[in-house]
Image (spheres, grey):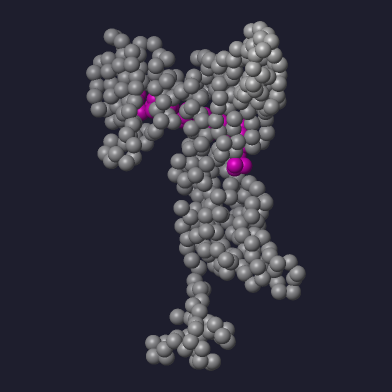
Amino acid sequence: MELRVIEKEPTMISIEIAGEDHTFMNVLKGALLESEGITAATYDVNPEQSGGQTDPVLTIKTEEGVDALDALEDGAQRVVDKSDSFREAFEAAA
Amino acid sequence: MQDYEVEFVERGDREARFLVRGITPAFANGIRRAMIADVPTFSIDQLRVVENSSVMFDEQIGLRLGLVPLTTPEGEFEIGDEVTLALDVEGPSREETTETVTAYSGDIVSSDELVRPADDNIPIIDLKAGQRLEVEADAVLDHGREHAKHQGGVAVGYRHLQQVEVVGDKGEFADDEPHILRGVIEDDGELIATDEFDNDLTERYPDKELAVEDVPNAFVFHVETDGSMTVEDLVVRAVDSLRDRADELRESVQL
Amino acid sequence: MSYKCSRCKRDVELDEYGGVRCPYCGHRVLLKERSRDIKDVDVR
């Protein structure tokens, strides 16, 4: 996955995630907002026709003492866990 | 990690309805979108027309062939992989009494038994006496987001599970209008598809005052595939595609 | 270029001097035949 950090402070990160769309970004944003220590998480995507920046830009703000990049890592792990847990439940029912 | 609860309401190979409890709208929508656009399937992408004396242009035949669903097994192929198929059908000979011979998807011969038409009865074209269609085609594995012919899920969506509660009797002079509801309702823990009572709650609860509410974080998925894989495969592959991306992101961030 | 005469149905090869005319029956309506080449088509 191609990442480009646009802005980085201890409690804030703005990062471009190449090649992704709403499918993944909204799941990730949802997972981030459920996590402890995160005060804000959002992403922005421009339409194809706009030209220029069309890859989504994810922005995270965290509480004092929580590193934003670590929070992103935890958020991604959360999506992995959710997926595993969903798959397990689905296969048990199927 | 929170646990999900999955329960099937209707189950078939190609069409199913299942309830998931404890799922956020964001995750539910991610799975839905992944089923439509991110699970790859094989589809004919290139043709070599040896003979086409039918009444349609090569491109029209190509378009029809592209829309024939092909079975797509898990783990055997990568994006961009190709499988060659062939179709050779001739119209009736002049002595025969039949007027036309129809070329069906079932006439397509595949070089790989894992990738073949999901249905045998899709008509491609009618051929009259003296007409012939002979083509060789390459099917390629790609995502639904590249072209709709690569979509595995054809009717994928979800609705909130709805809780129906009887709160009292309807007044004696109340309007007896139908109370239309679609999806799946929960009544005393029992799951009932609304088509069982003709989608009209007054059929099931005559003369009752009802309270209908969405159950939070409980979604009933309706999934229909084009036959390139089963519903179960489609769902699992969609979830795995989200998982793989999250895992990739986590690893990239660690560096 | 290969053509077919629309009247006598015979195959006709045209060259640049002969004009548009079937050498067998003199008919002036010729139909162009599909090339025997294998045609590549992109399905997009």
Which range is magenta? B226-255
Tell me residue B240's x, y (percent).
51, 30
Q: Residue at x 40, y 14 (%)?
A: A35
Q: Is residue B255 visible?
A: no
Q: Residue extending furthest top? A: B168
* In-front residue for pair C24/A26: C24
Q: Is residue B233 magenta?
A: yes
Q: Is residue C16 visible?
A: yes
Q: Residue extending furthest front? A: B173
Q: Residue at x 49, y 53 (%)?
A: B45
- Considering the image in quadrants, where does the C terminus of chain B appear? top left
Tell me residue B201's x, y (percent).
66, 20
* In-front residue for pair A93/B9: B9
Tell me residue C8's x, y (percent).
58, 87
Tell me residue B227's x, y (percent).
62, 42
The answer to whether B174 appears left or right of A37 in the picture is right
The answer to whether C38 appears left or right of B112 in the picture is left
